[in-house]
Image (cartoon, grey):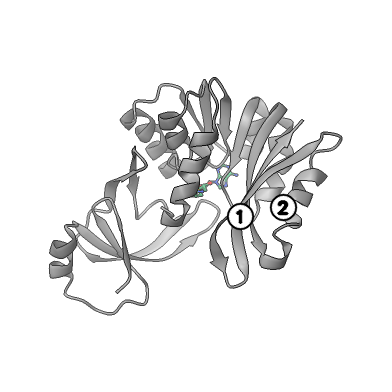
Amino acid sequence: MKYKKIGDILILDNNSSQEDYESLSKKHNVKTIMKIDHIEGTKREPVFKILYGNDTQTINKENGCLFKLDLAKVMWSKGNNNERLRIAKLVEDDETVLDMFAGIGYFSIPIGVHSNAEKIISIEINPNSYNFLCENAKLNKLDNLIPVLGDCMVETPKFKADRIVMGYVKTTHHYLNVAINSLNKGGIIHYHETVPEKLIDIRPIERIKNESGNRDVELLNLTKIKKYSPGVWHVVVDARIN
Ligand SMILES: C[S@@+](CC[C@H](N)C(=O)[O-])C[C@H]1O[C@@H](n2cnc3c(N)ncnc32)[C@H](O)[C@@H]1O
């Protein structure tokens, strides 16, 4: 049986068969067992089934950070664990960081915990995620995190940053232009994209260059985060824009 544990909740693989859920809960020391069929829409909301228990709110500990979340309302991607820490460790002292699709603070919280950023501006459109983002800032004692409820297309132009995290896939390229316009000279963007395998080295960087106008783009790094679907990868490109 395949499963993952998020806080004190067990998420079973969709293909797993009927079990004695009570003994399973005792074995894994969890209060609730769920299946998450898929994550829906732009607000990334779970379509789920509860198999045991009823409380879907938990606190997940990862990389020295605390993430309070409700698995019936917001998503958690275990496969992005390394990337969340990698970005946090790249942040230099006194940077202003803009996290464009902040969710419950997937990137913002580790950045706050593991760096000396001057401030972290975290924009999120889903009110449920935004409320957890605010709670998580308090839970991790971060007073340099500025949560913003709204659409990054509208909110991003109100800020300037040294580093911009674009942790969203599928339509992220539509937001490249607003991101680059808010990036200080010499700043860095972390641009996520789901891309067919044969286009990995071509399409993401080309899209960044196309939206950068006369500004010089330096490719710093390309990381394959995980397989998204057959033949398609979730990648992140780090690029400096002068
Ligand atoms: C769930 S996160 C992606 C997961 C994350 N990269 C991780 O490490 O697990 C994406 C978030 O972007 C938010 N979002 C989508 N479109 C948005 C927009 N236009 N403006 C602000 N937030 C948006 C969604 O509500 C969602 O919370």
Q: Nearer the viewer, residue 19 or 74?
A: 19
Residue 208 found in image quarter: top right
Q: Is residue 14 visible?
A: yes
Q: Which residue is mark 2?
A: 204
The residue lying at 57 percent from left, 24 percent from top is 96
Residue 166 found in image quarter: top right
223 relative to 240, above or below: below
Q: Nearer the viewer, residue 59 or 224?
A: 224
The residue lying at 45 percent from left, 56 percent from top is 79
Q: Which residue is mark 1?
A: 235
114 on left or right of 209: left
Extreme-right residue of the structure: 214
Residue 154 found in image quarter: top right
Report x, y in % for residue 110.
Answer: 43, 36
The residue lying at 17 percent from left, 68 percent from top is 24
Q: Are marks 1 and 2 in contact (CB under 8 Å)?
A: yes
The residue lying at 61 percent from left, 55 percent from top is 235
Check disc 2 and report its element: helix, strand or loop. Answer: helix
